Image (spheres, grey):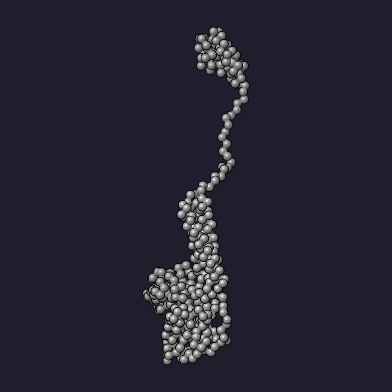
Amino acid sequence: MSHRSYLDPPKPQGAPELDPRWQAYARQYAAADSESRHAMRLGLAPDQRAVFDLVWERLGPGLEAASRAPIVPPPVAQRPSHYPKQAPQKTEHSKLGVGIFKFAGWSTAITVAVVAATSFAKPEDGMPGGALVFMAVGALWLIHTARNLEAGAPTRTGTLGCLGFVVLLTIGGATIEEEPSNRPATGAPVARVPAADTGTFTAAQVCQAGVALAMAKSAEIMNASAASEEGVYKIWYRRPSDNSRWDLRCKLEGSRILWASKGGRWRNDPRDSVLTFRVDSDTLIVKDAYGDGSAREGRYQAVNFTESPKPNEPVYDLQVINWQWGQSSDSYVEATGQVRNLSSRRLRVKAVVNFKTADGVFIASDSGMIEYQPLMPGQTSPFRVIARRNPQMQKASIRFTTPLGESLRARE
């Protein structure tokens, strides 16, 4: 059996251990077991065996040591279980921007402090406590934002600070009533003085006219309740701009009209204007005189006053001008009409018609959006609702809702 398949080594030359082919044969020999080594030696010619013995003498110890050394796998890069947190990067802001925040915050804080001191010393000249609280929080918010920006906080911190300040100031301003009268009562109580002759007008109408002139409102929107034992009338009205309700009090002392907001002080301070009345034939004349000598005057007729509804009368959103229904074809009935927006809001309105039998048993219901969307305050819009006809339909009723189904109060 020939063993020449392992290697056909070259013929002997100068330094055989430097020949790559002998080096390769020596590495194979070092890696082989004893039987394979014996076969490799027998496979060499005598001259080649002498050369290999020389090569193995020089390379063998090193190859033997290398073959006996344990194989150590290369180290595997380990991914860290977590990465260290990076410190937040600071944002450089202009000194002018930070200065504006500081100035706005501290100036608001100083203003709140001054107004609060004034309100404590003279409640009648001060500002409601709720407004002061919101303004103070807004000032602190702005100062805190300025410090954060100065420390390198991101730009969005300034944006959120501005929005928070505006919101707090808006809420604070909303707590201030339209009339600067909702403050603690001050001054000595006014003794009861009989009212002067009101002629053809009632004391309630005189109060309605006086409050209307003081509030710069129309007397037609003023409502009065029955007088209390002290002769005090409750006057209330709804502000046309937003339909909000305002409650006041009024009483007559001689020819003077005294009024106050609900829970507020009477306008009897020497610094207050003097509201008086007199009757000239069928005309009620109300005069509001100021300390500087100027005055305002209002003249009212009996037609200027309407019967006052009860204070808890519902507020209507819509006025149904007219509507009717009937058969429009062999298969359909139709309801048509007009509706007006009585509120101060823009309304999206849907008309809903319910059809019943002569005994009031419900048959069907159908709906349709009115023609003008949205319906502006004071605007009138036509509407039309078509439903499939049922021979039992004898009665119909109408109501109005928003597109989402919220009921709207309608007066017919």
Along the viewing direction, whichever of 208 and 328 lies nearer the viewer: 208
Horizontally, is 36 left or right of 391 in the view?
right
Q: Is residue 230 above or below residue 160?
A: below
Q: Residue at x 54, y 64 (%)?
A: 136
What residue is drawn where x is 60% and y is 21%?
Answer: 66
Query: Residue 120: percent from the left, percent from the top?
Result: 57, 71
Total marks shown come to: 0
Instruction: Tell which of 310 and 271 is nearer to you.
Output: 271
**Residue 167: x and y, percent?**
50, 63
User: Residue 26: x and y, percent?
Assistant: 56, 16
Q: Can the viewer see residue 13 in this picture? A: yes
67 or 389: nearer the eye?
Answer: 67
Q: Is residue 113 above or below residue 85?
A: below
| Left or right, 233 with reference to 352 | right
Residue 309 seen in the figure: no
- In the image, residue 197 lies at what x, y percent? 49, 91
Q: Nearer the viewer, residue 384 or 346?
A: 346
The residue depicted at 56 percent of the width and 75 percent of the height is: 184
Name the residue furthest top.
47
**Farthest front residue in view:** 292
Q: Is residue 119 above or below residue 79?
A: below
Quadrant position of residue 188: bottom right
Q: Quadrant of the N terminus?
A: top right
Please identify the quadrant where the C terminus is shown.
Answer: bottom left
Residue ID at (52%, 60%):
106
| Residue 176 drawn above or below residue 229 | above
